[in-house]
Image (cartoon, rainbow, N blue to C red):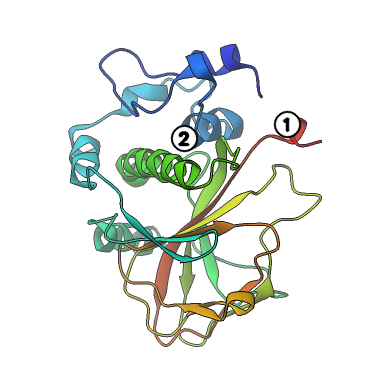
Amino acid sequence: MSNIEEFTKWLPRPGDNLCEDINPDNNSIVCGLARKHNCGHYDPTDSVRWDHHTTYAEKLKEALPPELTYNVAAPGILLFNNVLPWADELIGVLDKLDKWSKLDPDYSSGSSFLMSGKLHQELRPYDEAIELLMCKLLIEYKQYNQFCFANIDTGYAAVKYQLGDYQREHTDSYANWPHSREISTVIALNTHKGGEINFRHFNLSVRLKAGMVLMHPSHAYVHCIEPAGQTNYHLTTWFGYPPEEHQ
């Protein structure tokens, strides 16, 4: 997993220009490339692989802001604004496909829609644009915190909290998880009503607006999600590194 040569065969062909921030020469392999390889999203037997680039995917990527800016809400907690201009459109596609499944009731009453792995055809253009955004977010966080060594994401999902749904207090890192979780990332797809994300150790409560991104360390940052006052949607992922790199 940490072998650079293993990833280079998954790089886009010349002209694909998926993410200019991927540079195998200096080991700066970031989220999208590793996630696709690791989960088999585009494995060697999949004739689609990188050939599914479409005009619509390019339009979605072009709509992303050229530069990302953030505020530091508390040590290690970053808030980015207006990073996903087509979030409402993505909500419509997710609800049309209607593949939501309930989260673990021991900690959350919400539902999730796994967007890693084999994708529905309707989601492929969005996946490409989200991958580019994930790359840019991780790079921004690593520039903020030079002691962040995450180099992949662990796959991502859409999450839906309907009226009254909540998440109990928890941290995002577990000792027996297949990948380390170093940085947690939440991307709001609509403006949330209720559903504040509370970090009690910082006396901080965050209510997300459409297109806003919250990033924070996965270890030790205890947080919960208050009951939703409407149907709230977001994407979530965790940046980390493969098991062999943190043993």
| Residue nearest the viewer, comparing 100 with 21 | 21
Residue depicted at 29% across the width and 23% down the height: 17
The percent coordinates of residue 35 (x first, y second) are 54, 35
Measured Cα–Cα span from mark 1 to mark 2: 18 Å
Q: Position of residue 210 (x, y in %)?
A: 30, 67
Element assignment for label 2? helix
Residue 69 or residue 48, whichever sits in front:
69
Front one among 165 and 182: 182
Residue 245 - label: 1
Image quarter of residue 125 = top left
Q: Which mark is residue 227?
A: none
Q: Considering only vertical position in the picture, is 133 above or below 50?
A: below
The kind of secondary structure element at disc 1 is: helix
User: Residue at (40%, 40%) from the top-left corner?
Assistant: 131
Please give left or right for residue 65 compared with residue 119 in the image: left
Instruction: Say above or below: 185 vs 124.
Output: below
Labelled disc at residue 32: 2
Does residue 194 appear anywhere in the picture? yes
Q: Position of residue 99 (x, y in %)?
A: 47, 59
Residue at image location 65% in from the left, 37% down from the top:
241
Front-lying residue, 207 or 117: 207
Q: Earlier in the sequence, mark 1 or mark 2?
A: 2
Q: Residues within 10 Å of mark 2 (few under 14, many from 20)?
A: many
The answer to whether the residues at label 1 and label 2 have Cβ atoms under 8 Å apart is no
Give the number of the mark in front: 1 or 2. 1
Q: Amino acid at mark 1?
A: Glu
- The residue carrying pointer 1 sits among few (fewer than 14), some (14 to 19) or many (20 or more) residues within 10 Å by Cα, namely few
Q: Quadrant of residue 149?
A: top right
**Amino acid type shown at disc 2:** Gly
* Whether residue 157 is situated above or below residue 120 in the rendered picture: below
